[in-house]
Image (cartoon, rainbow, N blue to C red):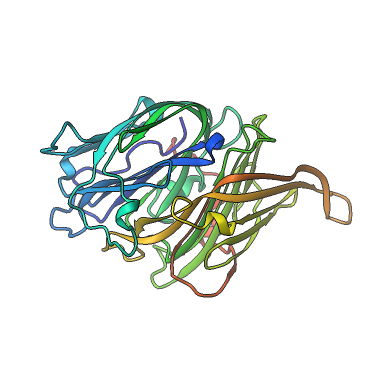
Amino acid sequence: RTPHSGYHRIEGFPRPFFEGWYFRVTLPEIRDNLSLIYHVYDPDLRRSERRGAGAQVCTPGGKYIWRESRDVERFTAAPHELALRMDYAHAEGGPEFYEVAAGGSVHRGRLRLGDEVNDPSVWPPEKLASEVRWDFSIEPVAGYGDRGRATSTAGWLSSLPVFEPHYQITMAHGLATGWIETNGARVEFAKAPAYSEKNWGGAGFPSRWFWLQCNSFSAQPGLSVTATGGNRGVVILPGVREEVAAITIHAPGGDFFPFVPVAGEGVEAADLTWSVSPWGRWTVRGVTPTHEVEIECWIASEDDVVGGTTVLRAPMDDAGAGMAPLCRESFRGSMKVSLWERDVAATKGRGRCILDGVQSDTAAVEVGGGPWTEAWVGSAEMREPLGTLAGAPVDVDAV
């Protein structure tokens, strides 16, 4: 089981708290996607204006549905495994719910368009689904980390409220079989690439971020690539912000190549840099003493249309605010990945090529927060003393 799969709520502890789950299934044959996004806010703060639980679903064909309820007691989740469920009250035409069970391997749900407000300038009526149902199972292939050894994305400090919001890839690659039905039209799939991750914590979300993910490379089945970066506040250093990033590559044979800004057990610290346009182009690079990676993503003009681009609700930078339309995402991004060993000789340049410009046109690509009007050129730099602390050999389970 991947660390942090369970629900992080401390029941009865009255603090601002958010937890969100993201599940994606890619449908390469039709160059499409489905994604399920769940969240819960402030379950132990009854007077919180943002208190609630909800779901967003992006369906094949580009439809979107959003449901939200302040009745948080109807949301339940397991503390030590990936399992959650939300039941909606007084549903007409049959029960409305969403469910993840059996450690994240079973997904079911049925949602109908409710009375939640959807700004027509962001989500025009033709974008909204009136009803979505789904039922599929996932065979996990890779969690996060080396073969046979799941690890935390941010090391031992992800067990403390320091790097909030925390981030964890819960399944880098899996194979999904089942169906999703949108307004009565069913799409079936078998052994489709699946991916999942989550965020949680009591602090605000990054003020801006980028995110790239793909595990559907026809030339490299089973390859999973994720790259993300953001500008966030530092919980223990009020008023201080930092820019952080990570690139993780899970190779088909089980090899794991992490590029993170701090050293850890068996992991060298990486230099991470990026250039991200306001929309349409991403370049991210990472270098460690032993490896180098370059990821390029772009949106073709013919894909930058309804059905290829979706605006999603995401948490705000203000820890007291809820969800807002801050995120733009496409499931038809093009991704090109190159990975090299570093030459250990005096040149310290690129050595053996492990991934030579491997490409896919079904990548998920995203920008969030901001907005910004010029290219965001940045580099990861974790503030001290957190950088040193993150690399310390601490056995959280023993503690």
Q: Position of residue 33 (x, y in %)?
A: 47, 41
Reply above or below: 359 against 165: above
Q: Position of residue 50 (x, y in %)?
A: 21, 57
Which residue does the image show at 46% across and 65% down from the upper left? Answer: 208
In the rendered view, does 248 fall on the left or right side of 323?
Answer: right
Q: Residue furthest left?
A: 90
Which residue does the image show at 29% across and 34% down from the upper left? Answer: 84
Q: Quadrant of residue 131?
A: top left
Q: Position of residue 356 (x, y in %)?
A: 76, 45
Which residue does the image show at 21% across and 50% down from the upper left? Answer: 52
Closer to the camera in the image, 5 or 132: 132
Can you say which quadrant of the picture contains the C terminus?
top left
Which residue does the image show at 57% across and 71% down from the upper left? Answer: 375
Closer to the camera in the image, 218 or 382: 218
Closer to the camera in the image, 240 or 249: 249
Reply above or below: 393 against 82: below
Residue 341 appears anywhere in the view: yes
Count of number-bearing discs:
0
Residue 77 appears anywhere in the view: no
In the rendered view, does 163 fall on the left or right side of 54?
Answer: right
Q: Position of residue 25 (x, y in %)?
A: 47, 36
